[in-house]
Image: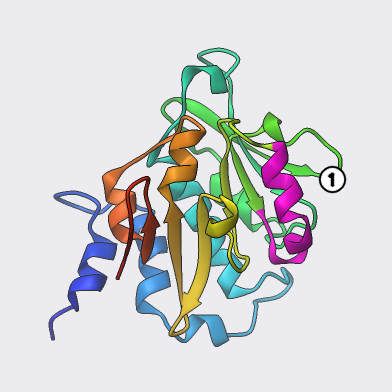
Amino acid sequence: MKTPPNQRSALRFGNGLLPWWAGLLAVAFLAPRLLCAEPEPPVAVSPEHRIKAAYLLNFTRFVTWPGRAFLNAGAPLTIGVAGQNPFGSVLQQIIEGEKVNGRPIVIREFAPGEDLTQCHVLFIPRAESSRVPAILASLRDAPVLTVSETEDFLEQNGMINFLVQDKKVRFEIGQKAAEQAGLVLSSRLLKLAVRVITNKSETGK
């Protein structure tokens, strides 16, 4: 049985053997029943958010930040979560020991009112959807990759938005917003998105 073209593209970022994290991405495309499964105790994190946590790490490998985003060559890459953290300890477990371009990765939770520019990736959970306009306004032109799971996130100038299609976690990309912030997204990442908004047009699958 042949793998459908859209699944093959999701599994191949390059030639040769797949890196370890490709298996985590594959879960999102090849396990449609996963989102219906019960969370495993004692961590009350949904299967959907386990997949999204893996994606957050993988996104960092396909984004280039401008030099001004880091204090120095050894500064860590910070993944922030705005408000209520839906990942529990899962995100911390996933990034443990990982590096991006030689930089260690750290997780930081941001309470309302804190300076959100002090991270490189910011996840805005569904529970914080009412704050999306204010959060994005506070990050205008800052080199922060904004990621969410809220309706119309790209239309509000967000950069990556998760959505569930046919019980599979997918994502759409606002390339225009990323470029305005000085971020460069890999073409390989763009090819996996179900929709991409660019400076010139909007493409979708």
Say whether residue 19 is visible.
Answer: no
Q: Residue 119 occupies which quadrant of the picture?
A: top right
Q: Position of residue 80 (x, y in %)?
A: 67, 43
Considering the image in quadrants, where does the C terminus appear? bottom left
Q: Position of residue 38 (x, y in %)?
A: 63, 84
Q: Is residue 16 above or below residue 161?
A: above
Provide the residue span drawn in magenta.
124-138
User: Along the line of sight, which residue is nearer the eye, 123 or 177?
Assistant: 177
Residue located farthest toward the top when viewing the structure as drawn: 72
Q: How is the image coloured?
A: rainbow
- In the rendered structure, does residue 187 fall within the stretch colored magenta? no
Relative to 130, 78 lies left or right: left
Residue 181 appears in the rendering? yes
* Residue name at image x 66 percent, y 37 percent: 139
| Residue receiving disc 1 | 111
**Residue sitting nearer the eye, 113 or 202:** 202
Q: Can you say whether 47 is above or below 100 in the image?
A: below
Amino acid type, residue under disc 1 in the picture: Ala
Which residue shows up at 35% across the image and 67% down it?
A: 26
The image shows residue 204, relative to residue 178, as above or below, that is: below
Q: Is residue 134 left or right of residue 3?
A: right
What element does badge 1 sit on? loop
Residue 132 or 10: which is nearer the viewer?
Answer: 132
The residue lying furthest to the front in this view is: 200
Quadrant housing residue 102: top left
In this rendering, the count of numbered labels is 1
Quadrant assignment for the N terminus? bottom left
Which residue shows up at 68% across the image and 60% down it? Answer: 87
Q: Position of residue 149 (x, y in %)?
A: 60, 64
State the residue at coordinates (47%, 83%).
167
